[in-house]
Image (cartoon, helix red, strand yellow):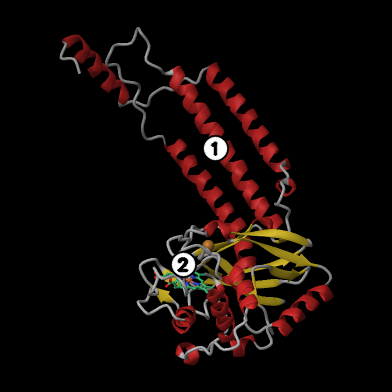
Amino acid sequence: MRQDGRYCSQITVKVAVENKDPVVHLDRGFWVVTAVLAILSAAAVIGVIFWRIQDIPQLPEAVIPAAQVDALFKFLTASAATIFIVVVGYLLYFAIKFRHRATDAPDAVGVQIHDNRRLEFWWTAIPTIFIILLGIFSIRIWYEVQIQPNTGLVLEAIGHQWFYDFRYPGVHGVVTDEMHLPLGIPVTLHTTSQDVIHSFWMPAMRLKADMVPGLINTLRFTPTRAGRYKIICTEFCGTLHSTMNKQVIVIEPQDKFNAWLNGWKQKNAHASDAIPSASAANAPVNLSGGVASAGQTLFSQKCTACHALGPFTQRVVGPGLRGVLHDPSHPKLVDGDPATPDNVAKIIKGGFDGDMGHMPNASQNAISDKDIADLVAYLNTLK
Ligand SMILES: [Cu+2]
């Protein structure tokens, strides 16, 4: 501040004025701007109300409560648009209106306003009412999705690096990759993870649940529209996160769904016997009778996410496996054991955590001893 006597005396005058209630002159400009902002806000609100989110590709409202979620989303968007327009509009207007002018003293200070009871009451009351409305609106949907008792079809989705398994009532073991649901039957979907945090998002269902190891998050909904919709993992979960892009298929009629489910019941009839239980987990695998062609199919389903068929150094997540049994420059496996079929089977069965990362064990990969024999027979053909 300048030490010049003239300016000091001016400031003294201003301080004296501050102690009284400042007289606010809202001139015509203010009311014109207010009218323009009101019209813009109304246009934004009407635009949002008539916006058909369900017409966007991949975003039909495929379940109850997708329409309710869209309504909540529109309520939020319309409110946010109004607040944005009003705040930014006045900000710009006042910044221009009360800008520093050439005729103002260099250290001129604007009118200092504080303590306006009326204003403070309203800017507390309006947001409070808004938040309460938002809360009521959200909790109603949240109750439907989270709290209601389980009804209809109860199933489980389990996240893995980098795929999903689904468990259906009456089906041994797991159903892989695609989730099938009957049309019109309420679904209770319990989700969790086997390894890291994934997030299970079904955009057409407007539902999402974090898949957290050791925690079960539940979604409840009723499919109302047959078709194929996306399942997307929305939590970065490692190198192949982007491949966790699968499908949920809503089937009509009920018979067709039952036929699909029976197919898996038969296919997996012996799966629970075949997948090693904890007690048998360390027993060596009998490798006789392994079928290389079966192993090749399994390899492309269960292993290529992490292993290339190139040399050891061609790494995806784990090492390349082309020379795992026949490469003179690769005499030892990652666990230090010599590269023999039995030792390879041991790694596939028990898994291994080493410098490169985590090789899942047989139960995590959902493969049986017979599968391991087939896989080793296949790896043995690679030279
Ligand atoms: Cu994931």
Tell me the quadrant of the picture where the N terminus can be found.
Answer: top left
Please say if 320 is above or below 262. Answer: above
Q: Tell me if residue 155 can be seen.
A: yes
**First in residue order: circle 2 vs circle 1:** 1
Q: Does mark 1 have its CB less than 8 Å from ligand 1?
A: no
Q: Position of residue 52 (x, y in %)?
A: 73, 45
Q: Nearer the viewer, mark 2 or mark 1?
A: 2
> Which residue type carries mark 1?
Ile
Residue 124, compared with residue 215, is above or below; it is: above
Q: Residue at x 69, y 37 (%)?
A: 47
Q: Quadrant of residue 274?
A: bottom right
* Amino acid found under the numbered disc labelled 2: Val
Q: Nearer the viewer, residue 227 or 289?
A: 289
Image spot of residue 301 (x, y percent): 61, 70
- Give percent across and percent down for residue 42: 66, 34
- The reply to whether the residue tagged 2 has its Cβ within 8 angstroms of ligand 1 is yes
Callout 1: SS: helix
Q: Using residue 183 as the reference point, say whether residue 149 is left or right of it.
A: left
Q: Which mark is residue 83?
A: 1
**Residue positioned 47% across, 27% down in the render:** 91
Is residue 151 in view? Answer: no
**Circle 2 sits in a helix, a strand or a loop, which is it?**
loop
Location of residue 81 by image quarter:
top right
Res. 196 mark: 2
Mark 1 is surrounded, within 10 Å at the Cα level, by few (under 14), some (14 to 19) or many (20 or more) other residues, namely: few
